Every structure is written in C-alpha cells, then in structure tokens.
Image (cartoon, rainbow, N blue to C red):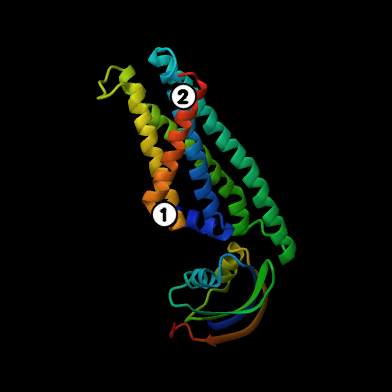
Amino acid sequence: MVLVKKLILDILKPHQPNALEFSSNLADTGDDYRVELTVIEMDENTETIQVVIEGNNIDFKTIQSAITDMSGSLHSIDVVEVQSVSDKEK
Amino acid sequence: MKLLNQIGFLLRITRTHGIVRRYFVVNGFDGALTMLGLIVGFLFSSPEDLSVIINACLGAAIALGVSGVSSAYVSEKAELRKVLSELEGAMLTDLQNGAHAVAARWVPVLIALVNGSAPLIISLLIISPLWLSNIGLQVLVPPLHAAISVALVLIFMLGIFIGRIAGTFWLRSGIQTLFIALLTMLLIYLFSGG
C-alpha cells in the first residue's frame, strides 16, 4: 500500500477564484490537507502557480478534479513524496 | 446554504456582484417611477374605475419585468460567453467542465431574474393599496394617495440602498431619490394640465 504524502504541482489558472479561495477549495477536498500556494507568474488573464499539498494520504484524482472544477489546468507534477505501508499498519 | 455559497462563488469568479446590484437599483427605480407616473397621471385625470387603473399598472409592471429578464439574459449571456472564450484562448484548453463555464450558463439567468423581478416586485408593492381597496378592504387614505405614498417610501429606500453602496450618508441619498420622484410628479402635473 502506497500513501501519497506530498505533491508539488504546477498549475495554470484564471485570476478568479483567487489564490486564497483556490487553495482553500483544494484543502477542503481532504481531511488533513495542508496547502501552500505560490504565484509564480501572472499575465492579463491567467496566473501560473505552484501548489504544495501535504497530508497523510492525498487523493490525487480528487485534487485533479477540484483543479478542473475551478477552471485550472494541471501542467506538471514536479515533486512527489510517497510512503509505503503494510496493510497491517494502515 | 450550499446553493447560496455556490451562487456567491459564481458571482465572485465572474466579478458580477456589482452588475447584479446595479441592475437591481436601476430597474427597481424604473419600476417605481413608472408606477408613480401612471398613478399620478390617473390622479390628475378624471376619476377612473380602480380596476382600470390596476390593469394599466399591472400591464406596465409585467412589461417591465419581461423586458428586464429578456434584455439582461441576452446581453449577459453574450458577455460571459465572450469572457469564457477569451479565457480558453489564454489557457489553451477547453474549460467546459470548469466553474467559468457553469457561471457562463447560470449567472446570466440570475442577473436576468434580478433585472426582471426588481421592477415587477416594486411595482406590485406600489399598486397593492389599489388591490386592497378594490377587494373591499378599507385603507386609511384614498387608494391612489396610498399607492403614491408607498411609491415614495420605496424610492426613498432605494436611495438609502444606493447611499450604503456608495458609502455616503444614507439620508442624503434617500432625499436625493425622493427629490427625483417629486420632480417627476411636478412635471406630470405641469404637462398633464392638472
């Protein structure tokens, strides 16, 4: 069993929802997610952001779905931290 | 509550809070002044049956409502579709599954409902004394005078609302809109030969 502990994502998003609402909505998708969002670049209509998500067991599909729902586009998964646990430990 | 949160979210991402407020005030004012004008016109004319006055006012109220809904829906849908298209161009991706596409479908409906219901509801409130009198309920003052009073109160309240939005003194903006209503009545009196 492999648990995803940390993800660093490169995302392109419109200006709205703003960074606070975007990161809050991502955090809302899990019970213990910690989300850190940094705006890397900005133009007239869009902004490129880096999102760091940490948690006990991150559900990537839910995160991806939330990004799409907010009209964001996942460009790349830059960093992944996973941990394997035996079924007994889980 | 969840629906309200969702509506708030869609208004936030499209930045249309101001438009909704503006349409409410502008068209609410339209409805109030139109009803005031009709009722004052009837007051300065030879007395008519209350049902004739009610039907004339109701016709105008419904027309204002339908006009508000249709015009706002068509124009806002076009605007938000344009914004969505520009955003898709900027992001080089299809956004049809995202919040902005949902907003492009539903925010025009919301804005249209506000734009149409504001003059309709305000108009119905203004002609309510006429209805009450027509069904036999006694009002303290003659029904046309009561309706005019309701119109002036609603116009004053719209002024207060405008003042709150602008952050100015509420009484001043209320008096300003009331002045406009009284000026309207004076013009009708002068031009109708009353």
Inspect this view and state whether residue B9 appears.
yes
Quadrant of the rendering where the C terminus of chain A is positioned = bottom left
Chain letter of the residue beneath label 2 in the structure image: B
SS for dot 2: helix
Q: Position of residue B21 (x, y in %)?
A: 50, 49
Q: Amino acid at mark 2?
A: Tyr
Q: A74 or B140: which is nearer to us?
A: B140
Dot 2, crowdedness within 10 Å: few (<14), some or many (≥20)? some
Q: Nearer the viewer, mark 2 or mark 1?
A: 2
SS for dot 1: helix
Q: CA distance from mark 2 to mark 1?
A: 32 Å
> Which residue: 33% across, 22% down?
B143
- Residue B101 circle label: none
> Which residue: 64% across, 46% down?
B77
Rendered view: B48 above or below B140:
above
Chain letter of the residue beneath label 1 in the structure image: B
Q: A79 or B84: which is nearer to us?
A: B84
Q: Position of residue B68 (x, y in %)?
A: 56, 37
Rendered view: B84 above or below B52:
below
Dot 1, crowdedness within 10 Å: few (<14), some or many (≥20)? some
- Residue B189 circle label: 2
Rendered view: B81 above or below B148:
below
Q: Position of residue B169 (x, y in %)?
A: 39, 55
Image label count = 2
Q: Position of residue B52 (x, y in %)?
A: 44, 15
Q: Amino acid at mark 1?
A: Arg
> Which residue: 56% across, 37% down?
B69
Residue identifier under label 1: B164
Inspect this view and state whether residue B121 appears.
no
Q: B162 or B185: which is nearer to us?
A: B185
- Same chain for the residues under marks 2 and 1 in the image: yes
